[in-house]
Image: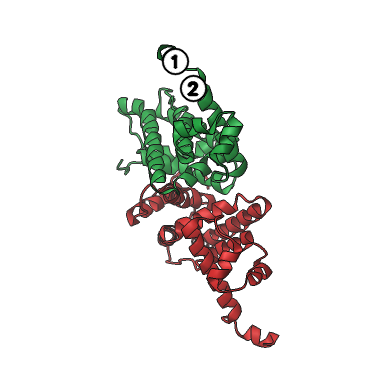
Chain colours: A green, B red
Amino acid sequence: MDDQSRVRRPGGRSARVRAAVHKAVTELAAERGYGNFTVAEVAARAGVADTSIYRRWGNLEALAMDLAIDRLTSQSSMPDTGTLDGDLRAYAAKAAADVSGPDGLAFLRTILALLDTGEAGAQTRDRFLSERGEQIQRMLASAVARDEKVPEVLEVVDFILAPMYTRTLFGTGPLTAEYVDTLVDRLLTATNRPNHTG
Amino acid sequence: MDDQSRVRRPGGRSARVRAAVHKAVTELAAERGYGNFTVAEVAARAGVADTSIYRRWGNLEALAMDLAIDRLTSQSSMPDTGTLDGDLRAYAAKAAADVSGPDGLAFLRTILALLDTGEAGAQTRDRFLSERGEQIQRMLASAVARDEKVPEVLEVVDFILAPMYTRTLFGTGPLTAEYVDTLVDRLLTATNRPNHTG
């Protein structure tokens, strides 16, 4: 296969390997928790050679980070319902579905475990947070263009994501549609209150 | 030493062993993360026999749980400033100091790691959450007695604790006094808004 045919096949072998490796890491993280499996085990489950993983990602931390960013960006087509209210509700519902999904808790735990790995952890955090921040900014962009009053990115995190993460991590109750709507209501109330300085 | 003298000495050997073991676990959790040390290592650092730990706590999970609950309850003398506003600010400042302290992150990580340990994890969670809930109820009790409108326990968690936990776990910025006050402002605004149903 020459370079040209490689370029012509974005869904080819390379993408299949990546998908298989990501799937293997996701499963192992859900089964055992991040930190309790090796590159060799990922390779065996994905049906690829260890060397393919080392050549492509370098180490397990970099692979897990790639997975985390991939997961975040794969959901980055942001809602555009025509109102800030609608966009926030769509964003919150999507974030809740993601965090509550079968591997949502394992994903959160993986991110947190990665943050504990020194310099690589700091890089992971920076990439993750910058990706998440840009995602939220994209969601707010159309409301900004309509000259609507919008919340700060950190307010979206505090009001919507933080309670979802905390509920999921501590296992203190399901993220029901009603609960998710309450979180959005609180953010909108805070954003629109007269003395809001944002 | 007979039973009577044991009763007379609440700060005696048993309490010293407990304190030394708790200190050893706290240090090891901060240094290596929960899950990366053994009962033997705790015993060695605390200067006690392994068997003392097994006899008293049964296993490492039970020991870590005891520590978590102890830590929570040791801070359970709740503020009583005469106003809900003052009590909430004192409570939030204390929670922030605790989470930001030298072993605050290790403590949070330990709780989360414990929650991942099956049945023992579920028991830990239930004890931790029930203790935390009672702590918050105690804080709200005097405002309730004054017939003030008070937030729900889960609102205190969502507005104040969840953003603090998320910032600390993800390492996204210090819990400054200004930030902590902002969290309380948001909760009070939500509690006092006309259409609040709580």
Instruction: Return the x and y of residue B46 as percentages of the image width and height.
Output: 54, 71
Instruction: Return the x and y of residue B162 as percentages of the image width and height.
Output: 47, 49
Specify few, some or many for label 2: CA neighbours under 10 Å numbering under 14, 14-19, or 20 or more: few
Answer with left or right where residue A21 lies relative to residue A189. Answer: right
User: Is residue A177 visible in the rendered structure shown here?
Assistant: no
Q: Is residue A52 above or below residue A12?
A: below
Instruction: Return the x and y of residue B118 as percentages of the image width and height.
Output: 66, 50
Specify few, some or many for label 1: CA neighbours under 10 Å numbering under 14, 14-19, or 20 or more: few
Mark 1: which secondary structure?
helix
Residue occupied by mark 2:
A14
Instruction: Return the x and y of residue B101 as percentages of the image width and height.
Output: 41, 61
B54 or B97: nearer the viewer? B54
A54 or A84: nearer the viewer? A54
Pointer 2 and pointer 1: residues touching (CB < 8 Å)? yes
User: Is residue A85 visible in the rendered structure shown here?
Assistant: yes
Residue occupied by mark 1:
A6
Identify the subunit bearing mark 2: A
Residue drawn where x is 30% and y is 28% of the image:
A147
Disc with the residue nearer the chain's start (2 vs 1): 1
Answer with left or right where residue A147 lies relative to residue B70. Answer: left
Amino acid identity at mark 1:
Arg
Amino acid identity at mark 2:
Ser
Residue drawn where x is 50% and y is 34% of the image:
A95
